[in-house]
Image: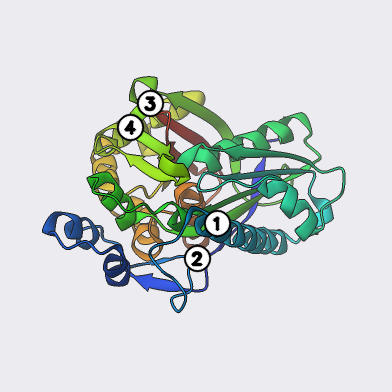
């Protein structure tokens, strides 16, 4: 069976980038502990779907929903169009479209909007992956992989978009302050085909740890989205990175030293620090994960595709090289893919 290949990756960000100091000022935290979450995040700035001339911190539920809709539709289309251009495809070449978001709700969903705005065929098959958190781009990627396994002559497009700033919630919880310190807005798209150039996706795997179900997610007091983000994530995440790596390596009888390329979700500074220890990685091997966090922040599901784009752009891979791509999300879940060149 021919394996799906990554034909192209592209990203899109809002027009305005804000310094970490500006976001801290808008959040209004005065105590040292909450301010420290911002100052120690190693994030220099973030792109947010906000107009600095019009933004007010007392948005209503309707304001948040409207901002999500506007940003999600604009950024998903930009990322998709850029990926299609890089792959040299027309929108009518796409046979399967998978979209994902967790920071807002649309009905019809993002995929339906893209079918029209991109100009896809009326018979394009599609799926929308919702409410799966930071790992959902990997879940959508697996759905596209499965489709291409069944229909190897097809072409697939995966689009992840998040407007995390529409889930900012003012309260006294420390975890809300942590969320405000790291999350950002962005979109990314991946074009997949079984032909042409690009790394192959040799295997996909999912790992669940339901005993940690409450560690991460969303709740909706008064209808407003509010991030649930336990401090235990910094312990659970790296351990699941390591476990997922072992599972994927076993599919091909590989060892960790056989992996040259590491594409890890930029969950946060401490998660990356501990992942280095758990996986025995050097700073060079997580350089792209750190750079994405520093320049963009954590864009939930889109983040790992930003790391993938930077890796494929900057790293020179040779035939026979292997790579691991791992995302983390609520459930608690790890989603991984084994890449080969």
Q: Is there a contact, CB below 8 Å, between mark 2 and mark 1? A: yes
Residue at x 43%, y 32% (from the top left corner): 334
Which label belongs to residue 68? 1
Which label belongs to residue 215? 4
Q: Nearer the viewer, residue 50 or 132?
A: 50
- Give the crowd class for mark 4: few <14, some 14-19, many >=20 residues within 10 Å: some
Residue at x 52%, y 68% (from the top left corner): 14
Image spot of residue 298 (x, y percent):
39, 54
217 w.r.t. 47: above or below? above
Q: Is there a contact, CB below 8 Å, between mark 3 and mark 4? A: yes
Helix, strand or loop at disc 3? helix
Q: Is there a contact, CB below 8 Å, between mark 4 and mark 1? A: no
223 w.r.t. 85: above or below? above
Report the Cα–Cα distance between label 3 and label 4.
Answer: 6 Å
Image spot of residue 193 (x, y percent):
72, 45
- Circle 3 residue: 213
Report the Cα–Cα distance between label 2 and label 4.
Answer: 27 Å
Q: Earlier in the sequence, mark 4 or mark 1?
A: 1
């Amino acid at each position: 069976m021919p394996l799906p290949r990554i034909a192209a990756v592209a990203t899109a960000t809002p027009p305005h980038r804000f310094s970490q100091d500006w976001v801290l000022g808008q959040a209004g935290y005065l105590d040292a502990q909450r301010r420290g979450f911002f100052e120690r995040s190693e994030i220099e700035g973030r792109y947010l779907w906000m107009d600095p001339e019009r933004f007010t911190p007392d948005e209503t539920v309707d304001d948040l929903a409207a901002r999500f809709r506007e940003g999600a539709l604009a950024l998903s289309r930009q990322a998709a169009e850029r990926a299609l251009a890089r792959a040299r495809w027309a929108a009518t070449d796409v046979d399967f479209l998978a979209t994902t978001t967790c920071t807002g709700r649309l009905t019809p969903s993002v995929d339906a909007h893209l079918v029209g705005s991109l100009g896809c065929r009326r018979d394009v098959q599609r799926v929308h992956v919702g409410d799966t958190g930071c790992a959902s781009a990997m879940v959508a990627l697996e759905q596209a992989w499965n489709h291409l396994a069944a229909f190897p002559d097809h072409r697939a497009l995966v689009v992840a978009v998040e407007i995390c700033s529409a889930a900012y919630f003012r309260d006294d919880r420390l975890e809300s302050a942590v969320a405000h310190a790291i999350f950002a807005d962005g979109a990314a798209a991946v074009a997949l085909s079984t032909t042409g150039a690009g790394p192959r996706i040799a295997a996909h795997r999912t790992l669940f740890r339901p005993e940690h179900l409450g560690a991460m997610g969303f709740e909706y007091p008064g209808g407003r989205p509010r991030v649930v983000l336990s401090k235990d994530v910094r312990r659970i995440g790296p351990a699941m990175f390591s476990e997922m790596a072992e599972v994927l390596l076993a599919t091909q009888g590989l060892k960790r030293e056989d992996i040259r390329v590491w594409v890890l979700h930029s969950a946060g500074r401490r998660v990356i620090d501990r992942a280095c220890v758990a996986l025995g990685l050097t700073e060079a091997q997580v350089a792209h994960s750190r750079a994405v966090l520093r320049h963009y922040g954590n864009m939930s599901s889109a983040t790992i595709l930003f790391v993938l784009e930077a890796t494929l752009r900057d790293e020179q891979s040779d035939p026979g090289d292997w790579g691991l791509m791992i995302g983390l999300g609520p459930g608690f879940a790890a989603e991984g893919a084994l890449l080969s060149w």
